[in-house]
């Protein structure tokens, strides 16, 4: 009897723990069945009218129709997406009702991270991959170059003299430029701007020498003037909408391809059943003709193949590690 009593005492904590886990799982499942129970907010780290804002608003429209619940788009622009990230990370409850559309690659400056209550994208739950956007390398027409090779030769002949513009330190365009300069073996100077519009304006005016910009923006300028040249696309294959623009890789920069990727994230700790429900709903939203029509004017933008939340997390981590490694290897600073 004493042995039986002892075994019972030893087993009791295990049974209690198992019961708690079972209750928690059942509670999370029940929450997912009722989700959403109130309005859902999609936080956008860029200003209204930007491509990422349009993507978010189209997704919000589809979710609103699906759930018969309010879905609000909240624009919170700020350096390296940190204003939006901070807002979502500090939500009191990780219940899936506050989401963020994150633009990658994006490297948050370490000095800024030290001042925040989160450590970067690892403090978020990956939900869905909603867009993949190739970019174009555009060069000011003041330079007599008509191919990537001629541009690289010019840069190598003038190390540290050619300037490029980006939409800010740590932004997708900043990281893509650094990736390309490393792959091509050239030394160039970064000029950060507040917006992509400012970059385009100074590129057209000849104040900077080149920039990696959205294909749609570049094509508009090619159609209306001759102040810039598109030397290559960052995609791994030629973009069907712009078949005459060769890829950077096919022009000699082997293995180079880069996309701006758009992910939906939730606060870390959001129950897995709710993340799964969000993933399924957002994948359905991005498969609609309405969403496809939102992407079409952007130029080259496409909906990635549907992924589970786990697959999205792996894709996000893989991309983040590539650019964090680039920061370390090139000793990129964020002063």
Image: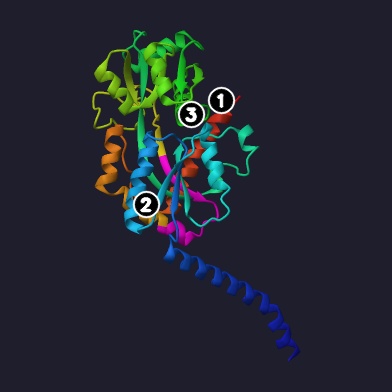
Which residue appears at 43% of the width and 58% of the height?
A: 276
Query: Looking at the image, do the residues carrying marks 2 and 3 touch, with CB atoms under 8 Å apart?
Result: no
Real-space Cα distance between discs 2 and 3? 27 Å
Q: Residue at x 23, y 27 (%)?
A: 243
User: Of helix, strand and loop, which one carries label 2?
Assistant: helix
Location of residue 214 with respect to 74 vertically, above or below: above
Q: Earlier in the sequence, mark 2 or mark 3?
A: 3
Location of residue 239 by image quarter: top left
Location of residue 180 with respect to 279 vertically, above or below: above
Q: Can you tell which mark lies on residue 330?
A: 1
The numbered mark, 1 or 2, whose residue comes first in the sequence reads 2
Residue 311 vertical placement versus 259 (above, below): below
- Residue 15: x %, y % from top left: 62, 77
Question: In the displayed structure, would residue 75 be above or below residue 67?
Answer: above
- Mark 3–mark 1 Cα distance, whole angstroms, equals 11 Å
* Residue most extreme to the bottom: 1
Quadrant of the rendering where the N terminus is positioned: bottom right
Query: Who is closer to the viewer here, 193 or 328?
Result: 193
Q: Position of residue 135 (x, y in %)?
A: 36, 29
Residue 175 - label: 3
Packing grade of label 2 (10 A; few <14, some 14-19, many >=20) is many
- Residue 170 in magenta stretch: no
């Amino acid at each position: 009897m004493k042995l039986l009593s002892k075994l019972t005492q030893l087993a009791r904590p295990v049974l209690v723990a198992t019961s708690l886990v079972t209750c928690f799982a059942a509670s999370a499942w029940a929450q997912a069945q009722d989700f959403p129970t109130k309005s859902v907010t999609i936080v956008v780290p860029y200003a209204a009218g930007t491509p990422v804002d349009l993507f978010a608003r189209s997704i919000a429209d589809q979710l609103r129709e699906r759930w018969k619940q309010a879905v609000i788009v909240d624009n919170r622009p700020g350096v390296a997406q940190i204003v939006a990230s901070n807002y979502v990370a500090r939500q009191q409850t990780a219940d899936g009702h506050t989401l963020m559309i994150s633009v990658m690659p994006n490297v948050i400056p370490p000095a800024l991270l030290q001042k925040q209550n989160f450590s970067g994208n690892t403090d978020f739950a990956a939900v869905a991959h909603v867009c993949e956007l190739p970019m174009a390398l555009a060069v000011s027409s003041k330079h007599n170059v008509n191919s990537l090779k001629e541009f690289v030769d010019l840069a190598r002949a003038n190390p540290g003299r050619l300037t490029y513009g980006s939409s800010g330190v740590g932004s997708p365009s900043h990281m893509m430029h650094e990736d390309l300069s490393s792959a091509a073996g050239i030394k160039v100077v970064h000029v950060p701007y507040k917006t992509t519009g400012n970059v385009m304006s100074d590129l057209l005016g000849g104040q900077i020498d080149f920039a990696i910009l959205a294909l749609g923006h570049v094509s508009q300028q090619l159609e209306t003037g001759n102040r810039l040249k598109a030397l290559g696309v960052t995609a791994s294959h030629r973009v069907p909408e712009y078949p005459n623009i060769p890829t950077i890789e096919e022009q000699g920069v082997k293995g180079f391809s880069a996309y701006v990727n758009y992910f939906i994230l939730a606060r870390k700790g959001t129950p897995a059943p709710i993340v799964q429900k969000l993933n399924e709903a957002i994948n359905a939203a991005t498969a609609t003709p309405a969403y496809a029509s939102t992407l079409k004017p952007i130029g080259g933008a496409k909906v990635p193949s549907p992924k589970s939340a786990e697959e999205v997390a792996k894709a996000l981590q893989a991309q983040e590690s590539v650019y964090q490694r680039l920061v370390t290897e090139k000793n990129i600073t964020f002063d």
